[in-house]
C-alpha cells in the first residue's frame, strides 16, 4: 500500500498503537472499545487519503523535474494548497524556469556563435579572393608601374582585412562582457578631436567640410578611447555618404538631464528599408557594396549602449543622414 519506508514504519506503529488502544478500551468498557475502534478507523482513513494526496503531488513534481533534466519543451507544475508543499512547488517552479532560461540563452549563444563564424568567413572570403587574384596578376605582369599599382591595391585589401578582424575581436570582447570601461568625466571637445584626428587627411583629400558646435565645458561619463572609436565609425559612415565636396556637422547639447551629440552629413540619407536594420551586425544596406562590411555601426551601438547611452539614426528633413547619441545624466 505504502511505497515509502518511513511511511510504512509509521503505519505499522499506528496499527500497533490502535490495537493496544482498542484492547484497553474493551477492558475498561465495551462502548469505549467501540469508540476507540471507530476513531482509529476514521483517523487512519483521513491519514491515508492525506498522505496519498501529498505523495501524488510529490510524484508529479518528481516527474516534471525529470522532464526538465531531459530538456522537455513544455513543463507545468500546478499550484498546491498553502503549506510546506506549496513552498516546495514554488521554489521548484522558480528553479525550472531559471534552468529553462539558461538553456535557452546557451542555445541562442551557440546559434549566434555559429552564425558569427559563418559571417566572418564570408566577410573575409571576398578580400582574400581579391588578394589572391591580384597576386597572380603581379606574377604575370612585367610592367613595373602596373606591379606597383597592384601591390598598393593588395596592401589596401590587407588593411581592410586587418580592420575587419580587429573590429570583430572588439565586438566579441564586448559580447563576452570582458571589457572594463573607465567611468571618468570626458571632455566632449577632446572626445571629438580624438575621433576626428585620424580622418583629417582623408577629409582634406575629398574636400569634406567639417563643422562642430560644442558648449564650453561639456563633459560625459565614460571611456575616452572606446567612445572616440564609436564616434569615428559614425564619421566614416558620414564621409562615405557625403562623398567629395560634402559637409559634416557635429552639434552638441548639454542639459541637466542628458548630453547629446548629433552628427549630420550632406549625403543622400538612408533608404527607408535600411533604417530599422542600420545597427545590425554584417548589414551593409539594401544597396551595400563590397566596401561595406556592416561592422562599424554595430560596434558603435554596442559601445554606446554599454556606456548607458542610446544612438538613433534618421533622415534629416533638409537631406542627409543624422546620428543622434544621447547619454543620460
Image: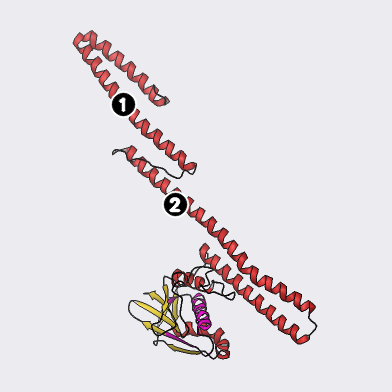
Residue 189 rendering spot, x and y as whole percentages: 45, 85
Asked whether 75 falls inside the magenta stretch, the response is: no
Q: Which residues are magenta?
A: 221-250
Question: Which quadrant is home to the C terminus?
Answer: bottom left
- The quadrant in which residue 206 appears is bottom right
Residue 219 rendering spot, x and y as whole percentages: 41, 81
In this picture, residue 132 sits left or right of residue 87? right
Task: Identify the residue at image location x=60%, y=65%.
Answer: 120
Task: Identify the residue at image location x=68%, y=73%.
Answer: 130
Instruction: Assess disc 2: are there few (<14), some (14-19) or many (≥20) residues with their C-alpha within 10 Å of its C-alpha.
Output: few
Question: Which quadrant is home to the N terminus?
Answer: top left
Residue 159, compared with residue 251, is above or below; it is above
Viewer-closest of 288 and 33? 288
Helix, strand or loop for disc 1 = helix
Residue 269 rendering spot, x and y as whole percentages: 46, 80
- Residue matched to label 1: 49
- Can residue 155 be seen? yes
Residue 278, compared with residue 110, is above or below; it is below
- Residue matched to label 2: 101
Viewer-closest of 44 and 197? 197
Amino acid at each position: 500500500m505504502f511505497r515509502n519506508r518511513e511511511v510504512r514504519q509509521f503505519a505499522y506503529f499506528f496499527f500497533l498503537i490502535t490495537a493496544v488502544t482498542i484492547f484497553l478500551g474493551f477492558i475498561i468498557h465495551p462502548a469505549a472499545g467501540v469508540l476507540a475502534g471507530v476513531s482509529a478507523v476514521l483517523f487512519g482513513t483521513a491519514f491515508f487519503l492525506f498522505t496519498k494526496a501529498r505523495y501524488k503531488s510529490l510524484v508529479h513534481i518528481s516527474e516534471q523535474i525529470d522532464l526538465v533534466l531531459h530538456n522537455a519543451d513544455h513543463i507545468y507544475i500546478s499550484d498546491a494548497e498553502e503549506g510546506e508543499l506549496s513552498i516546495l512547488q514554488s521554489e521548484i517552479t522558480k528553479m525550472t524556469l531559471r534552468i529553462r532560461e539558461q538553456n535557452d540563452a546557451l542555445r541562442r549563444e551557440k546559434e549566434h556563435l555559429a552564425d558569427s563564424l559563418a559571417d566572418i568567413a564570408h566577410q573575409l572570403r571576398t578580400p582574400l579572393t581579391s588578394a589572391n587574384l591580384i597576386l597572380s596578376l603581379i606574377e604575370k605582369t612585367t610592367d613595373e608601374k602596373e606591379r606597383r599599382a597592384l601591390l598598393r591595391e593588395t596592401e589596401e585589401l590587407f588593411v581592410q582585412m586587418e580592420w575587419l578582424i580587429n573590429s570583430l575581436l572588439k565586438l566579441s570582447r564586448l559580447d563576452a562582457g570582458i571589457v572594463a570601461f573607465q567611468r571618468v568625466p570626458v571632455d566632449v571637445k577632446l572626445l571629438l578631436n580624438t575621433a576626428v584626428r585620424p580622418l583629417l587627411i582623408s577629409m582634406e583629400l575629398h574636400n569634406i567640410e567639417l563643422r562642430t558646435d560644442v558648449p564650453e565645458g561639456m563633459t560625459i561619463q565614460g571611456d575616452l578611447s572606446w567612445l572616440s572609436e564609436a564616434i569615428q565609425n559614425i564619421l566614416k559612415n558620414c564621409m562615405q555618404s557625403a562623398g567629395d565636396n560634402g559637409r559634416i556637422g557635429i552639434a552638441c547639447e548639454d542639459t541637466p538631464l542628458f548630453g547629446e551629440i548629433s552628427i549630420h552629413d550632406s549625403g543622400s540619407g538612408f533608404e527607408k528599408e535600411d533604417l530599422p536594420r542600420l545597427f545590425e551586425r554584417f548589414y551593409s544596406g539594401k544597396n551595400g557594396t563590397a566596401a561595406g562590411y556592416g561592422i562599424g555601426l554595430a560596434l558603435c551601438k554596442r559601445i554606446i549602449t554599454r556606456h548607458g547611452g542610446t544612438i538613433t539614426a534618421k533622415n534629416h528633413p533638409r537631406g542627409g543622414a543624422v546620428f543622434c547619441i544621447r547619454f543620460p545624466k
